[in-house]
Image: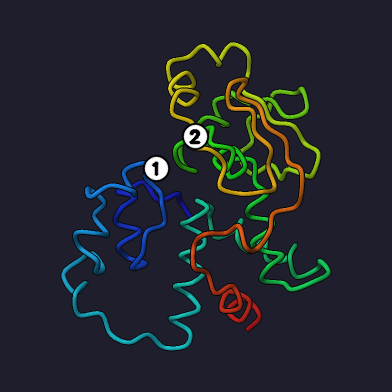
Amino acid sequence: MARYTGPDCRLCRREGQKLYLKGDKCFTDKCPVSKRNYAPGQHGQSRKKLTEYGLQLREKQKVRRYYGIQESQMLKYFNMADKMKGITGENLLKILESRLDNVVYRMGFAASRDEARQLVTHGHFIVNGKKVDIPSMLIKVGDEIEVKAKSKNSPRFKELVENHRGTTVKWVDVNPEDLKGKVVAEPSREDIDLPIEEHLIVELYSK
């Protein structure tokens, strides 16, 4: 399945809530979800009640769009989570939180996960001293992430230092002035700020 290239805000409206795909815009009055809190399209305002399958599908799609991953990746992560000890749904969310692009975003080195994915792909980050350009790389406890020396002087990263919004999770330790950070613990379910009913996703994939 090809990656979605349309307006990000349309995805938020489809799910009926903010997925914070546009960075700072999501926290302003310009956010389309605040203005038009109904699904896009001709029949967006006359949405019918969802079936059980529909609820499960929407929850899966919401998480996919939140983390910016494709269906094949989602299924791979679910299979990984299902083989791990513990609750499958929580394991799935922990895996998604451990993606490099998400960790970069959580550290405040990008305004959105989409920007974080782009910056990683363009080779602006170093993990444990080695250049990495794979956004889906899974980060472990103890891994250190740093902006490449040549990139630190770019206008974008200078702006990030000046306007660093701080980290929203406790499992990363960040030095915004040096544009480096370290994963100090495993992601916690409580740190995921989007209302997600992960059990619906488990039910969907378990059929």
Mark 2 burial class by Cα count in 10 Å: few <14, some 14-19, many 20+: many
Q: Which residue is mark 1?
A: 23
Q: Position of residue 196 (x, y in %)?
A: 52, 69
- Examine the image and state in which quarter residue 205 appears: bottom right
Give me the C-alpha separation between circle 2 and circle 1: 8 Å
Residue type for callout 2: Ala
Say if 79 sits above or below 49 in the image: above
Instruction: Residue 123 in the image: state x and y as whole percent.
Output: 59, 24
Give the residue drawn at x 57%, y 42%.
167
Question: At which x and y percent is residue 38?
Answer: 24, 69
Q: Secondary structure at mark 2?
A: loop
Which residue is rendered at x = 53% and y = 55% of the image? 70
Q: Quadrant of the C terminus?
A: bottom right
Name the residue beneath numbered marker 2: 110
Left or right relative to 80: residue 1: left
Q: Earlier in the sequence, mark 2 or mark 1?
A: 1
Q: Residue furthest left?
A: 42
Q: Nearer the viewer, residue 206 or 178?
A: 178
Count of numbered badges drawn on the protein: 2
Q: Residue at x 47, y 66 (%)?
A: 61
Where does residue 40 sit, x and y in percent of width and height?
Answer: 23, 64
Mark 2–mark 1 CB contact (< 8 Å): yes
User: Closest to the observer: 86 or 83?
Assistant: 86
At a point 52% along the width and 29% down the height, the residue shown is 119
